Image: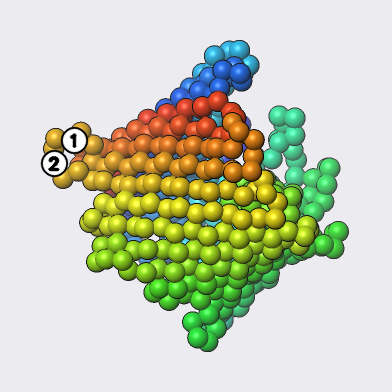
Amino acid sequence: MKSIFLLILLLSIATGSLRAAESQFQTETVLTYFDTPASSLYTTGNTVYAFQADVSPQAGPGLSFHINGKGLMTQTDGRRHNDISQAELELGYLEYRGDRAGFNARLGRQYIHEGTLVNVIDGMKIQSSLGNYFSASMFGGQPANIYNAGEQIAASTYGGRLTNFSRWHRFSLSYQKFESSETIEEVGGLNLKTNLPAGLTLTGQSYYDMINHIERSRDLRLSFSKRWISPLLRLLKRDTSKQDNSPLAIVAGNNQDFSYLGTKLSLPATSRAKLFLNIKNYDYVVEDNSARYYSSRLHWTASTKDYMGAETGFMQSRSRNNNYQIIRLYGHWTPSTNLFPFDNISSEATLINFPHREAGANKSVFMSFRCGKNLFDDQWQMGFSGNVNRAGDQETSLLGLVTLSYRINGNI
Protein backbone atom coordinates (compact mmCIF):
# COMPACT_ATOMS: atom_id res chain seq x y z
CA MET A 1 0.00 0.00 0.00
CA LYS A 2 2.83 2.40 0.84
CA SER A 3 4.43 1.63 -2.53
CA ILE A 4 1.18 2.42 -4.38
CA PHE A 5 0.77 5.69 -2.48
CA LEU A 6 4.36 6.65 -3.22
CA LEU A 7 3.87 5.90 -6.92
CA ILE A 8 0.71 8.03 -7.16
CA LEU A 9 2.41 10.92 -5.36
CA LEU A 10 5.47 10.85 -7.60
CA LEU A 11 3.38 10.61 -10.77
CA SER A 12 1.23 13.60 -9.80
CA ILE A 13 4.28 15.75 -9.05
CA ALA A 14 6.13 14.67 -12.18
CA THR A 15 3.27 15.21 -14.63
CA GLY A 16 2.69 18.71 -13.25
CA SER A 17 6.34 19.74 -13.29
CA LEU A 18 7.78 18.31 -16.51
CA ARG A 19 7.33 20.23 -19.75
CA ALA A 20 9.11 19.25 -22.97
CA ALA A 21 10.71 15.98 -21.99
CA GLU A 22 11.98 12.73 -23.38
CA SER A 23 10.27 9.52 -22.29
CA GLN A 24 11.33 5.90 -22.43
CA PHE A 25 9.27 2.87 -21.53
CA GLN A 26 10.47 -0.71 -21.45
CA THR A 27 8.65 -3.84 -20.42
CA GLU A 28 9.71 -7.48 -20.27
CA THR A 29 7.74 -10.67 -19.76
CA VAL A 30 9.55 -13.88 -18.89
CA LEU A 31 7.84 -17.27 -18.93
CA THR A 32 9.85 -19.92 -17.10
CA TYR A 33 9.48 -23.62 -16.58
CA PHE A 34 11.58 -25.30 -13.90
CA ASP A 35 11.58 -29.06 -13.34
CA THR A 36 13.65 -30.48 -10.49
CA PRO A 37 14.31 -34.18 -9.81
CA ALA A 38 11.31 -36.38 -9.04
CA SER A 39 12.56 -36.91 -5.49
CA SER A 40 11.91 -33.24 -4.69
CA LEU A 41 8.31 -33.38 -5.98
CA TYR A 42 8.52 -29.83 -7.28
CA THR A 43 7.64 -28.62 -10.76
CA THR A 44 6.82 -24.97 -11.35
CA GLY A 45 6.10 -22.45 -14.06
CA ASN A 46 6.69 -18.74 -13.46
CA THR A 47 5.53 -15.64 -15.29
CA VAL A 48 7.60 -12.58 -14.43
CA TYR A 49 6.52 -9.12 -15.59
CA ALA A 50 9.07 -6.31 -15.36
CA PHE A 51 8.70 -2.69 -16.45
CA GLN A 52 10.82 0.45 -16.46
CA ALA A 53 9.85 4.02 -17.35
CA ASP A 54 11.94 7.19 -17.45
CA VAL A 55 10.81 10.75 -18.14
CA SER A 56 13.54 13.39 -18.22
CA PRO A 57 14.26 16.84 -19.74
CA GLN A 58 15.33 16.83 -23.37
CA ALA A 59 18.59 18.62 -22.53
CA GLY A 60 20.40 20.04 -19.53
CA PRO A 61 19.40 20.05 -15.87
CA GLY A 62 15.89 19.71 -14.56
CA LEU A 63 13.37 17.34 -13.04
CA SER A 64 13.04 13.71 -14.12
CA PHE A 65 10.99 10.73 -13.05
CA HIS A 66 12.08 7.08 -12.91
CA ILE A 67 10.14 3.95 -12.03
CA ASN A 68 11.00 0.25 -12.07
CA GLY A 69 8.90 -2.67 -10.89
CA LYS A 70 8.07 -6.31 -11.38
CA GLY A 71 5.34 -8.85 -10.80
CA LEU A 72 5.43 -12.61 -10.33
CA MET A 73 2.90 -15.35 -10.94
CA THR A 74 3.88 -18.91 -9.99
CA GLN A 75 2.01 -22.06 -10.95
CA THR A 76 3.22 -25.20 -9.15
CA ASP A 77 2.17 -28.81 -9.18
CA GLY A 78 0.61 -28.29 -5.74
CA ARG A 79 2.42 -31.14 -4.06
CA ARG A 80 4.84 -29.03 -1.99
CA HIS A 81 4.19 -25.36 -2.73
CA ASN A 82 1.14 -23.18 -3.33
CA ASP A 83 0.69 -20.83 -6.29
CA ILE A 84 2.05 -17.31 -5.72
CA SER A 85 1.06 -13.92 -7.16
CA GLN A 86 2.84 -10.77 -6.05
CA ALA A 87 3.98 -7.36 -7.28
CA GLU A 88 6.79 -5.11 -6.11
CA LEU A 89 7.90 -1.54 -6.76
CA GLU A 90 11.69 -1.80 -6.99
CA LEU A 91 12.43 1.85 -7.77
CA GLY A 92 10.29 4.99 -8.04
CA TYR A 93 11.77 8.42 -7.51
CA LEU A 94 11.87 12.02 -8.63
CA GLU A 95 15.30 13.38 -9.48
CA TYR A 96 16.43 16.97 -9.83
CA ARG A 97 19.76 17.77 -11.49
CA GLY A 98 21.14 21.25 -10.95
CA ASP A 99 23.20 23.17 -13.47
CA ARG A 100 25.98 23.96 -10.97
CA ALA A 101 28.29 22.05 -8.64
CA GLY A 102 26.99 18.68 -9.77
CA PHE A 103 23.93 19.06 -7.52
CA ASN A 104 21.56 16.10 -7.49
CA ALA A 105 18.52 15.39 -5.30
CA ARG A 106 16.29 12.30 -5.28
CA LEU A 107 13.00 11.66 -3.50
CA GLY A 108 11.31 8.24 -3.39
CA ARG A 109 12.36 4.61 -3.52
CA GLN A 110 15.98 4.47 -4.66
CA TYR A 111 19.31 2.67 -4.43
CA ILE A 112 22.03 3.98 -2.14
CA HIS A 113 25.71 3.02 -2.22
CA GLU A 114 27.08 4.75 0.88
CA GLY A 115 26.97 1.68 3.14
CA THR A 116 26.39 -2.04 3.38
CA LEU A 117 23.48 -2.30 5.85
CA VAL A 118 20.66 -1.22 3.50
CA ASN A 119 20.81 -0.56 -0.25
CA VAL A 120 17.19 0.44 -1.02
CA ILE A 121 15.29 3.13 0.89
CA ASP A 122 12.06 5.10 0.75
CA GLY A 123 13.47 8.53 1.43
CA MET A 124 15.68 11.34 0.18
CA LYS A 125 19.26 11.65 -1.01
CA ILE A 126 21.24 14.81 -1.82
CA GLN A 127 24.70 15.00 -3.33
CA SER A 128 26.86 17.86 -4.58
CA SER A 129 30.42 18.85 -5.40
CA LEU A 130 32.37 20.87 -2.83
CA GLY A 131 34.90 22.73 -4.89
CA ASN A 132 37.25 21.09 -7.38
CA TYR A 133 38.47 18.21 -5.21
CA PHE A 134 35.62 17.18 -2.90
CA SER A 135 32.05 15.94 -3.12
CA ALA A 136 29.52 14.87 -0.48
CA SER A 137 26.23 13.00 -0.25
CA MET A 138 23.63 12.51 2.48
CA PHE A 139 20.59 10.26 2.69
CA GLY A 140 17.85 9.29 5.08
CA GLY A 141 14.62 7.33 5.07
CA GLN A 142 12.94 4.01 5.73
CA PRO A 143 14.58 0.78 4.53
CA ALA A 144 12.52 -0.87 1.82
CA ASN A 145 11.67 -4.56 1.54
CA ILE A 146 12.88 -5.61 5.01
CA TYR A 147 10.40 -8.05 6.53
CA ASN A 148 10.04 -10.15 9.64
CA ALA A 149 7.53 -13.03 9.60
CA GLY A 150 5.93 -11.56 6.48
CA GLU A 151 5.49 -8.07 7.96
CA GLN A 152 7.58 -5.06 7.00
CA ILE A 153 9.48 -3.88 10.05
CA ALA A 154 9.50 -0.25 11.18
CA ALA A 155 13.05 1.00 10.82
CA SER A 156 15.08 4.02 9.80
CA THR A 157 18.48 4.58 8.26
CA TYR A 158 20.66 7.57 7.47
CA GLY A 159 24.24 8.30 6.49
CA GLY A 160 26.47 9.87 3.92
CA ARG A 161 29.78 9.91 2.10
CA LEU A 162 32.63 12.41 1.73
CA THR A 163 34.89 11.97 -1.31
CA ASN A 164 38.24 13.50 -2.23
CA PHE A 165 39.28 13.08 -5.86
CA SER A 166 41.80 14.20 -8.43
CA ARG A 167 43.01 13.04 -11.81
CA TRP A 168 45.01 10.25 -10.18
CA HIS A 169 42.93 9.08 -7.23
CA ARG A 170 39.54 8.83 -5.53
CA PHE A 171 39.26 8.39 -1.75
CA SER A 172 36.01 8.37 0.23
CA LEU A 173 34.76 7.88 3.78
CA SER A 174 31.19 6.69 4.34
CA TYR A 175 28.86 6.16 7.29
CA GLN A 176 25.50 4.41 7.68
CA LYS A 177 23.29 3.80 10.71
CA PHE A 178 20.36 1.38 10.79
CA GLU A 179 17.89 1.41 13.69
CA SER A 180 14.77 -0.64 14.40
CA SER A 181 12.91 -1.89 17.46
CA GLU A 182 15.09 -5.02 17.39
CA THR A 183 18.60 -3.83 16.54
CA ILE A 184 20.95 -0.90 16.01
CA GLU A 185 23.87 -1.11 13.58
CA GLU A 186 26.55 1.39 12.59
CA VAL A 187 29.09 0.85 9.81
CA GLY A 188 31.90 3.06 8.61
CA GLY A 189 33.47 2.54 5.21
CA LEU A 190 36.60 3.43 3.28
CA ASN A 191 36.94 3.29 -0.50
CA LEU A 192 40.10 3.92 -2.50
CA LYS A 193 41.21 3.93 -6.11
CA THR A 194 44.55 5.34 -7.22
CA ASN A 195 46.75 5.09 -10.30
CA LEU A 196 50.35 4.36 -9.34
CA PRO A 197 53.53 4.66 -11.43
CA ALA A 198 54.46 1.94 -13.94
CA GLY A 199 50.82 1.24 -14.81
CA LEU A 200 49.84 -0.11 -11.37
CA THR A 201 46.31 0.41 -10.03
CA LEU A 202 45.36 0.09 -6.35
CA THR A 203 41.68 -0.26 -5.46
CA GLY A 204 40.11 -1.24 -2.19
CA GLN A 205 37.22 -1.01 0.19
CA SER A 206 36.80 -1.82 3.85
CA TYR A 207 33.76 -1.67 6.13
CA TYR A 208 34.06 -1.49 9.92
CA ASP A 209 31.42 -2.41 12.52
CA MET A 210 31.48 0.63 14.81
CA ILE A 211 29.45 -1.03 17.58
CA ASN A 212 31.29 -4.37 17.86
CA HIS A 213 34.63 -2.82 16.75
CA ILE A 214 35.47 -5.44 14.12
CA GLU A 215 36.18 -5.30 10.40
CA ARG A 216 33.16 -6.70 8.55
CA SER A 217 34.62 -6.92 5.07
CA ARG A 218 37.69 -6.03 3.05
CA ASP A 219 38.62 -6.15 -0.63
CA LEU A 220 42.05 -4.79 -1.64
CA ARG A 221 43.40 -5.22 -5.18
CA LEU A 222 46.74 -4.33 -6.75
CA SER A 223 46.66 -4.83 -10.51
CA PHE A 224 48.75 -4.15 -13.57
CA SER A 225 47.25 -4.31 -17.04
CA LYS A 226 48.91 -4.25 -20.42
CA ARG A 227 47.72 -5.64 -23.72
CA TRP A 228 49.10 -9.10 -23.06
CA ILE A 229 49.54 -9.48 -19.28
CA SER A 230 47.29 -8.68 -16.30
CA PRO A 231 48.70 -9.72 -12.89
CA LEU A 232 46.51 -9.28 -9.82
CA LEU A 233 47.04 -9.42 -6.04
CA ARG A 234 43.83 -9.50 -4.00
CA LEU A 235 43.26 -9.55 -0.22
CA LEU A 236 39.65 -10.41 0.60
CA LYS A 237 37.57 -10.72 3.73
CA ARG A 238 33.91 -11.56 3.15
CA ASP A 239 31.01 -10.13 5.13
CA THR A 240 29.51 -13.24 6.77
CA SER A 241 26.29 -11.39 7.63
CA LYS A 242 25.34 -11.43 3.94
CA GLN A 243 24.57 -14.27 1.57
CA ASP A 244 27.45 -14.50 -0.91
CA ASN A 245 27.20 -16.87 -3.89
CA SER A 246 30.09 -15.43 -5.85
CA PRO A 247 32.76 -17.78 -7.24
CA LEU A 248 35.30 -16.46 -4.75
CA ALA A 249 32.99 -17.20 -1.84
CA ILE A 250 32.37 -20.73 -3.08
CA VAL A 251 36.09 -21.34 -3.45
CA ALA A 252 36.74 -20.02 0.05
CA GLY A 253 34.14 -22.26 1.66
CA ASN A 254 34.27 -21.65 5.41
CA ASN A 255 37.30 -19.37 5.05
CA GLN A 256 36.13 -15.77 5.26
CA ASP A 257 39.61 -14.24 5.13
CA PHE A 258 41.91 -15.18 2.26
CA SER A 259 44.09 -13.80 -0.51
CA TYR A 260 45.09 -14.78 -3.99
CA LEU A 261 47.82 -13.88 -6.41
CA GLY A 262 47.33 -14.51 -10.10
CA THR A 263 48.01 -13.38 -13.61
CA LYS A 264 46.35 -13.62 -17.01
CA LEU A 265 48.30 -13.81 -20.26
CA SER A 266 46.77 -12.95 -23.61
CA LEU A 267 48.77 -14.32 -26.54
CA PRO A 268 47.78 -13.93 -30.22
CA ALA A 269 47.60 -17.36 -31.85
CA THR A 270 46.40 -16.22 -35.30
CA SER A 271 44.92 -13.04 -36.75
CA ARG A 272 41.50 -14.06 -35.35
CA ALA A 273 42.39 -16.29 -32.42
CA LYS A 274 43.80 -15.57 -28.97
CA LEU A 275 45.12 -17.86 -26.27
CA PHE A 276 44.45 -16.88 -22.66
CA LEU A 277 46.44 -18.43 -19.80
CA ASN A 278 45.42 -18.00 -16.14
CA ILE A 279 47.32 -18.87 -12.97
CA LYS A 280 45.94 -18.18 -9.48
CA ASN A 281 47.21 -19.10 -6.04
CA TYR A 282 44.82 -18.99 -3.05
CA ASP A 283 45.99 -18.74 0.59
CA TYR A 284 43.43 -19.08 3.39
CA VAL A 285 43.92 -17.34 6.74
CA VAL A 286 41.33 -19.17 8.86
CA GLU A 287 42.56 -22.62 7.93
CA ASP A 288 46.09 -23.68 7.01
CA ASN A 289 45.23 -24.39 3.43
CA SER A 290 46.14 -23.22 -0.06
CA ALA A 291 45.09 -23.98 -3.61
CA ARG A 292 46.29 -23.28 -7.13
CA TYR A 293 44.17 -22.90 -10.24
CA TYR A 294 45.47 -23.17 -13.81
CA SER A 295 43.43 -22.63 -16.96
CA SER A 296 43.80 -21.99 -20.68
CA ARG A 297 41.21 -20.67 -23.12
CA LEU A 298 41.32 -20.45 -26.90
CA HIS A 299 38.97 -17.79 -28.28
CA TRP A 300 38.30 -17.47 -32.03
CA THR A 301 36.49 -14.44 -33.50
CA ALA A 302 34.81 -14.85 -36.87
CA SER A 303 33.32 -11.32 -37.01
CA THR A 304 32.37 -8.48 -34.68
CA LYS A 305 29.45 -10.57 -33.36
CA ASP A 306 30.37 -14.20 -34.04
CA TYR A 307 32.82 -16.17 -31.91
CA MET A 308 33.52 -19.55 -30.37
CA GLY A 309 35.97 -20.92 -27.84
CA ALA A 310 37.14 -23.74 -25.60
CA GLU A 311 38.49 -23.61 -22.04
CA THR A 312 40.12 -26.17 -19.77
CA GLY A 313 41.43 -25.83 -16.24
CA PHE A 314 42.09 -27.61 -12.97
CA MET A 315 42.29 -26.80 -9.27
CA GLN A 316 44.90 -28.33 -6.95
CA SER A 317 44.26 -28.01 -3.21
CA ARG A 318 45.58 -29.50 0.01
CA SER A 319 42.00 -30.58 0.62
CA ARG A 320 41.71 -33.28 -2.03
CA ASN A 321 37.91 -33.12 -2.18
CA ASN A 322 38.21 -29.58 -3.54
CA ASN A 323 40.33 -30.67 -6.51
CA TYR A 324 38.53 -30.54 -9.82
CA GLN A 325 39.00 -30.39 -13.59
CA ILE A 326 36.82 -28.27 -15.88
CA ILE A 327 36.14 -28.26 -19.63
CA ARG A 328 33.97 -25.58 -21.24
CA LEU A 329 32.84 -25.01 -24.84
CA TYR A 330 30.91 -21.92 -25.97
CA GLY A 331 29.88 -20.03 -29.09
CA HIS A 332 27.72 -17.22 -30.50
CA TRP A 333 26.39 -16.88 -34.04
CA THR A 334 24.37 -14.23 -35.89
CA PRO A 335 22.98 -15.82 -39.07
CA SER A 336 23.32 -13.63 -42.16
CA THR A 337 20.64 -15.47 -44.15
CA ASN A 338 16.86 -15.53 -43.85
CA LEU A 339 16.89 -19.33 -43.82
CA PHE A 340 17.15 -19.20 -40.00
CA PRO A 341 14.23 -17.78 -37.98
CA PHE A 342 16.50 -16.22 -35.32
CA ASP A 343 18.84 -13.23 -35.31
CA ASN A 344 21.30 -14.66 -32.78
CA ILE A 345 22.13 -18.11 -31.43
CA SER A 346 24.47 -19.02 -28.57
CA SER A 347 25.26 -22.14 -26.58
CA GLU A 348 27.54 -23.35 -23.81
CA ALA A 349 28.49 -26.72 -22.29
CA THR A 350 30.53 -27.24 -19.10
CA LEU A 351 31.82 -30.46 -17.53
CA ILE A 352 33.39 -30.49 -14.04
CA ASN A 353 35.11 -33.61 -12.72
CA PHE A 354 36.06 -34.14 -9.03
CA PRO A 355 38.57 -37.01 -9.24
CA HIS A 356 38.76 -37.73 -5.49
CA ARG A 357 35.04 -37.91 -4.77
CA GLU A 358 32.90 -41.05 -4.80
CA ALA A 359 31.72 -42.45 -8.10
CA GLY A 360 28.35 -41.01 -9.07
CA ALA A 361 29.03 -37.79 -7.16
CA ASN A 362 32.21 -36.77 -8.94
CA LYS A 363 30.82 -35.11 -12.08
CA SER A 364 28.70 -32.03 -12.79
CA VAL A 365 27.31 -31.12 -16.20
CA PHE A 366 25.77 -27.84 -17.36
CA MET A 367 24.42 -27.14 -20.86
CA SER A 368 22.57 -24.11 -22.21
CA PHE A 369 21.11 -22.93 -25.51
CA ARG A 370 19.82 -19.43 -26.28
CA CYS A 371 18.36 -17.77 -29.36
CA GLY A 372 16.68 -14.43 -30.03
CA LYS A 373 14.69 -12.53 -32.63
CA ASN A 374 14.22 -8.76 -33.15
CA LEU A 375 10.79 -7.66 -34.37
CA PHE A 376 9.10 -4.45 -35.59
CA ASP A 377 12.19 -2.30 -36.22
CA ASP A 378 13.93 -3.78 -33.19
CA GLN A 379 11.36 -2.38 -30.74
CA TRP A 380 10.36 -5.93 -29.80
CA GLN A 381 12.81 -8.64 -28.81
CA MET A 382 11.88 -12.28 -28.31
CA GLY A 383 14.21 -14.82 -26.76
CA PHE A 384 14.21 -18.54 -26.02
CA SER A 385 16.63 -20.36 -23.75
CA GLY A 386 17.02 -23.67 -22.01
CA ASN A 387 19.40 -24.94 -19.34
CA VAL A 388 20.13 -28.51 -18.30
CA ASN A 389 22.06 -29.04 -15.07
CA ARG A 390 23.24 -32.12 -13.20
CA ALA A 391 25.38 -31.66 -10.07
CA GLY A 392 27.09 -34.70 -8.55
CA ASP A 393 24.71 -37.50 -7.61
CA GLN A 394 21.62 -35.31 -8.01
CA GLU A 395 19.15 -35.96 -10.80
CA THR A 396 18.96 -33.72 -13.85
CA SER A 397 17.07 -30.41 -13.57
CA LEU A 398 15.65 -28.44 -16.50
CA LEU A 399 15.04 -24.69 -16.83
CA GLY A 400 13.29 -23.15 -19.83
CA LEU A 401 12.64 -19.45 -20.49
CA VAL A 402 10.70 -17.43 -23.06
CA THR A 403 11.39 -13.68 -22.94
CA LEU A 404 9.42 -10.92 -24.68
CA SER A 405 10.72 -7.34 -24.40
CA TYR A 406 9.31 -4.08 -25.72
CA ARG A 407 10.92 -0.62 -25.73
CA ILE A 408 9.54 2.69 -26.90
CA ASN A 409 11.04 6.20 -26.92
CA GLY A 410 9.18 9.45 -27.45
CA ASN A 411 8.49 13.03 -26.36
CA ILE A 412 5.78 14.39 -24.12
Observer-nearest of 388 and 296? 296
Question: Does residue 104 appear to the left or right of 156 in the view shown?
Answer: left
Amino acid at pointer 2? Thr
What residue is pinned by disc 1?
A: 340
Decide: few, some or many residues near mark 2? Use Cα within 10 Å; few <14, some 14-19, many ≥20: few
Task: Please tell me which residue is depicted at 42% across the width and 29% down the height of the picture.
Answer: 400
Q: Position of residue 169 (x, y in %)?
A: 56, 79
Q: Does 131 sit above or below residue 159?
A: below
- SS for callout 1: loop
Number of numbered discs: 2
* Residue at the extreme bottom of the image, as rendered: 197
Q: Do the residues under discs 1 and 2 have CB atoms within 8 angstroms? A: yes
Q: Does 196 sit above or below residue 291?
A: below
Label disc, if present, on residue 129 of the rendered structure: none
Q: Position of residue 20 (x, y in %)?
A: 32, 54
Image quadrant assignment for residue 255:
bottom right
Q: Does 196 sit above or below residue 261?
A: below
What residue is pinned by disc 2?
A: 337
Amino acid at pointer 1? Phe
Q: Does 284 sit above or below residue 203?
A: above
Decide: few, some or many residues near mark 1? Use Cα within 10 Å; few <14, some 14-19, many ≥20: few
Q: Position of residue 122 (x, y in %)?
A: 62, 47
Q: Is residue 347 visible?
A: yes
Observer-nearest of 363 and 135? 363
